[in-house]
Image (tube, rainbow, N blue to C red):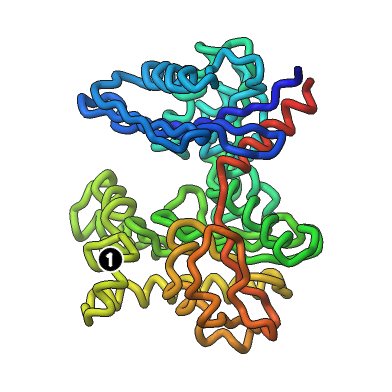
Amino acid sequence: MTPTRVLVLNSGSSSLKYQLLDMRDSSRLAVGLVERIGEQTSRLRHTPLASGETREQSGPIADHETALKAVAEELARDGLGLDSPELAAIGHRVVHGGMFFTEPTVIDDSVLTEIERLIPVAPLHNPANLTGIRTARALRPDLPQVAVFDTAFHTSMPESAARYAIDPRIADRYRIRRYGFHGTSHAYVSRETARLLGRAPEEVNVIVLHLGNGASASAVERGRCVDTSMGLTPLEGLVMGTRSGDLDPAVIFHFARVGDMSMDEIDTLLNKRSGLFGLCGDNDMREIRRRVDEGDEAAALAFDIYIHRIKKYIGAYYAVLGQVDAVAFTAGVGENAAAVRAAAVAGLEGLGLAVDEELNAVRSDDARLISPASARVAVAVVPTDEELEIATQTYALVGKKS
């Protein structure tokens, strides 16, 4: 029997998300989340899709090894244990792969060493990803483990887009360049948008807007990323839930010199206390829209700044691509906030962009077009599926190796 299951692990600093998929039909067998790892109030939520009934357990989970063992026990209760001969591989989300990793990679000691070397440019993410990998390898050392990198999709950017205008010798010494993030989402959504249009990815140009608490845009030319809004870190680009996005670098100098703020204080301000939250005290778009409808001026300004930045990137990436076949909205805000989609496209009719009010108001879990049939450029809502993308890439690689 050829194994066809892939377990996808997404390890955060204090959390472990997971999905088990059967790649014969890309169906989900189980999903779950362990959160608050290392605390007395840890919680595991596990849902086997056969029954759809979520099981929960609370109590201290000391570390990721304990968390993964608890996950394995839950899966075993459903006959889906990690010792199953049907398990083909474990796919790991790794946030930063630098320029070294341009595609999914089977993990060995040398791969772990390189991921560890990238910690200085991804201090919040790569350590947690490494913990998950090491834990999984210890539990199943015989099983192929695959790293799928958030940055890999963006390594196709030309140097003119990836380089900052600083001394290249200094940039290379400290690995300073634009890497981009959310790559698995941008890859999946751009491909699904082409499918929605009935065309091959190599035949279309797509602007993808991944709008969640973290937000990024990408310009995808014939299936390859040629520009993206996030840079060395996920701080650059669009206005986000708690991140500022694009900012004059001299603001940092000003904070340090005039505000007498430390680098850590500035880092916290720009990453955790800025964006929508910094502007109006909320980073939930549903709450912001409620406040806007009630006449709240701070919320209205935050919303307008958020939309203004999105429009700038649509226009910029239209220019980069030269020709655009579709603009695709995805992630929590992009998939669910009709007001954001309408506002982001409003006034861009000269670029061939428009949304149909009735189509835009429809709530659905399916990929769909929300532009009028007469529109020159399609506007789409495409639910992202990063776990499926990781599983697909993992299984494709394991299949090649077998």
Q: Quadrant of residue 99?
A: top right
Q: Which residue is nearer to you in this view: 321 or 41?
A: 41
Residue visible at 70% across and 21% down in the picture: 3
Instruction: Classify 319 as above or below 224.
Output: below
Which residue matches tag 1?
A: 287
Q: Which residue is nearer to you in this view: 230 or 23?
A: 23
Q: Quadrant of residue 351?
A: bottom right
Instruction: Classify 384 as above or below 86.
Output: below
Residue 327 at least partly seen: no
Residue 188 at least partly seen: yes
Residue visible at 33% across and 51% down in the picture: 271
In the picture, the quarter occupied by the N terminus is: top right
Q: In the structure shown, which secondary structural element does the residue marked by tag 1 occupy?
A: helix
Where residue 203 sits: x, y (%)?
81, 63
Relative horizontal placement of residue 235, taking residue 174 as reference (left or right):
left
Q: Quadrant of residue 23?
A: top right
Q: Which residue is nearer to you in this view: 211 or 380?
A: 380
Relative horizontal placement of residue 160, taking residue 46 as reference (left or right):
right
Where residue 86 sits: x, y (%)?
66, 20
Residue type (three-letter) at the residue carrying disc 1: Glu
Residue visible at 29% across and 19% down in the picture: 62
